[in-house]
Each structure stands twice: as structure tokens, then as C-alpha cells.
Amino acid sequence: MSQDMNLTLKVWRQPGPNAEGKLETYKVVANEHMSFLEMLDVLNESLIAEKKDPISFEHDCREGICGTCSLVIDGRAHGPQRGTAVCQLHMRHYKDGDTIVVEPFRAKAFPVIKDLSVDRSAFDRIIQAGGFISVSTGQAVDGNAIPVEREVASQAFDAAACIGCGACVAACPNGSAMLFTSAKVAHLGLLPQGKVEGKNRVKSMVAQMDKEGFGFCSNIRACEIECPKEISTENIARMNRYYTHAMINSE
Amino acid sequence: MALTGLFLILFLLIHLIGNLQLLANDGGKSFNIYTEFMSTNPLIQTISKGNFFFIALHTMQGLLLAFKNKKAKGSKYAIRASNNTSWASKNMALLGTLLLAFILMHLWHFWFVFKFGSNYDVVTINGTEMIDAYTKVSVVLTQPVWLISYIIGLIVLAYHLNHGFGSAFQTLGLRHKKYTPIINFVGKAYSILIPLGFAIIPLYLYFTK
């Protein structure tokens, strides 16, 4: 038997990028089987029925792998549950009568588009700056042609788990994108195919990151706590190492 | 930030080792000989200039970092939930500013007076005339108001070190499965033992006078 729960939501409403925003209070009836986003869908349905402007929020796969959803719930990026994106947060973790505050990811480099949707294209530009490997077109190379040490492969894989959602930036009191950038730098830089362009990659990605107006890392480590993929700050140390090496060794 | 920080961390240890001579029960003889050596030896004087420079550099880097990061964050959340991050890590700028005030007070007490003032006694030890730094230090530190100020300053230092020590290694990219836990343990121990070591001196002087 699922019990209905009456919730009070305080949601950040902001009509546009340059408009003033504020928290508005809504009542919604949810049940424990809903995901957090489905609960917001229910609220939006009722807002539409009342001919009111529905709340804008981002979502896509709803199975925790695309990195599109982006909410800060009661001050926690992706909500209170560790290692999950907000789409995988279910209402069974809440109880009848709860008040929940929902805000957008906040950082200068992530301007609000509307309500809870923010512009995260800064991440795309960081990837474009160096988050790739250059390969000749033609026949695909055999997957096992280049030997990769087991331990290195799994470290690269752990870094590659980053879905680029931006929770690290949202959680960081400095608005720093070091965890995201370092995950991409480590993911490619650890593997033989990515090592080739390693020096230029770390230099251009860090340069782009700074250009986008992200803050600097002061090792608070809120990012790794809030990361839905539990990316470790070990990658930040690794990126610092790569960066120092690239700066000393480049011409 | 990390490099200047590590230099200052090392400086603290040397400073403490020197200061522990205040505990020697010889009427200040060894401490006075030590201060005379420290203020006349050319190598020490060069390092001392470097130390002032690094404090200034560390302060400027820190302030710049704090301002840029505040700007990069932009607006604040309505609710700031605790997520198991350390308080010190989020308040390094505040702790650093308090420490700067503490250092200025400290320099006023024990540096400015000896360098430019005349409000101190002179003693003759082994035929050499030198400043009686021991008496000056004991007089200042045993006044309750300064005693408490120094203890507060040292508590601030403890928190600043608690984050700073390990953080410096992380920034330099020195992270290792085996060594990082050791570095972090040493860092936590250092952040408690160094301020404690400094605090014992005025407390000892206060309770034995």
C-alpha cells in the first residue's frame, strides 16, 4: 500500500536569465513510488491545469546516466542521497508533511536560463578545448591491440564515469570545475591513446576552464561528496601533476 | 598558496624549537643567547626577510583566491546543508585574516620593540651585552589579556593548519594510495601539536611566576 504524502515545496522561480528570482511555495501530493522528477511532473501538471507557468527543470534519461538533471535539494546537489543523480532519488526517502527547498545549480559560469534550468555549455567548451583524442579515420582498431595495465584501465574507467552534470560546480563554495575537468583529463590521459596529446590537453582544458569564470580549487572536497558518480578528488591531484609537468616541459 | 604555505609550516617548527628554550630553568640565559644569535647571524637574517616575504605573498595569494572564488560562486543557496566537509576548509580566508592580525600583534610585541623601540632591558651574558628578550617575553605573555589573545591566535592557527597541511600536498599533486593517509595523519597531528607546543610556553610562564 502506498501512502499519499502532502509536501510543501519551495521552488526557485526566475522568469529569465536577467530577471530577479525568488522562492515560491507550492503544495503537492506525492506517493513513495515516484521519483523526485515525477513528483515535479505532478506539480507541473496541476500548474498547467490552473493555467499557470509550469516549473522549468532539466531531465532526459531519468536513469542516472545522462547528467541532464540538475537540482539542488535542501542545499545538496542532486539531493541528500550519495552517489545518485536527482532522477534516481525517490520520494520514499521523504515523509508526509516534509518541506523541501529546490534550487538551481548556482555558479557564475552556470547562468540560470529559467527557474531550475541552468546553462552548462561552459562544460561543452571545456571538452571542445581538449577532451578528445585525434585518430585517423578508417578501419576501427582492434580493442585489445594496445595493452593497458589492469589497474590503469580501472582508474581511467572510474574517471570516465563522470556524466558531466555539473554537481561538482554546484556543490563547490568556490564554483570550481576542477573535478569535472580533472575527470576528463585523467580519463584520457591515463590511457595510451590519450597520452599522446596529454600535455596540450591539460593546458588547453585548464585555460578554457579559467576563461569560463569557474573558481579555483581550495580542496574543500564538497564536489566528491556530492558527485552522483563518486568521482574522486584524486583526479584533481593527478591533473595538478599533469599540469605542472606540461608547464615545465612544454616549449 | 601550497608552496608558500609549506614554507610557513616549516618555519613554525623551527620557531617552536627555538621558543622551547623559554622553558629552560636558567633565568632566560639560553633564550637570550639564542635570540642574540638569531638577530645577528646573516643567514638567519636572510631567511627572516624571506619569511616576511612569504607571509606577504601567502596573504596576497589567499586574498586574491578568496575574492575570485567569491565572484565565481555568484549567488548563494537559500539553504547551506552540511555535507561532511570540514569547517576549516571553507573558512580558510577568515582564519587567515585572523592569523594575519595575530601575526601583526605578535610582531608589535616581539619584533618592532626590539628593532625600533627602546622599551627593553639589557643583560650581559658571557661578557657580551645583549637584549634581555626573555624578560620582555615573560612580562608580555603573563599578562592575562595577552595570554588569552595568544591562546586564541594559536587555536586559529590549529584550524588553519588542519586544512592547510594536507591541502598543500593535494594542490601540488602529491597524492598516493600509500603516502597520502600518512601525510594526512601527520598533518592532523602537526596542527594540534605545534599550536599546543606554542601554547604551553605562556601557560608555563604564567603558572610558574
Image (cartoon, coloured by chain):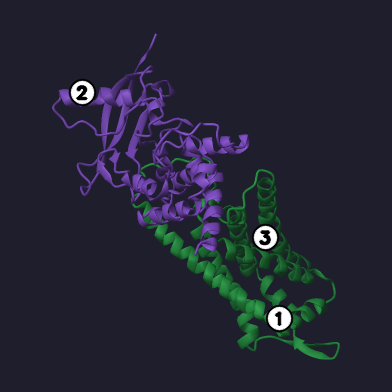
Chain colours: A purple, B green
The image shows residue B25, relative to residue B35, as above or below, that is above
Give the residue type at disc 1.
Leu
**Quadrant the N terminus of chain A occupies:** top left
Choose between A33 and A149: the one closer to the eye.
A149
Instruction: Point out the residue furthest to the left here.
Output: A51
The chain letter under disc 1 is B
The chain letter under disc 2 is A
* CB contact under 8 Å: marks 3 and 1: no
The image shows residue B126, relative to residue B54, as above or below, that is below
Residue B23 image point, x, y percent: 79, 69
Q: Residues within 10 Å of mark 2 (few under 14, many from 20)?
A: some
Instruction: Point out the residue furthest to the front here.
Output: A138
**Residue at image mark 1:** B43
Give the residue type at disc 3.
Pro
Residue A233 image point, x, y percent: 54, 45
Q: Residues within 10 Å of mark 3 (few under 14, many from 20)?
A: many
Question: Is label 1 on the same chain as label 2?
Answer: no
The chain letter under disc 3 is B
Picture quarter containing residue B50?
Answer: bottom right
Question: Is label 2 on the same chain as label 3?
Answer: no
Give residue A46's mark. 2
Instruction: Point out the residue furthest to the top here.
Output: A1
Measure the alpha-carbon separation of dots 2 and 3: 60 Å
Q: Answer left or right for A129 relative to B33.
A: left
Of callouts 3 and 1, the N-terminal one? 1
Give residue B195's mark. 3
User: Mark 2 or mark 3, which is nearer to you?
Assistant: 2
Where disc 3 sits, the SS reads helix
Where disc 2 sits, the SS reads helix
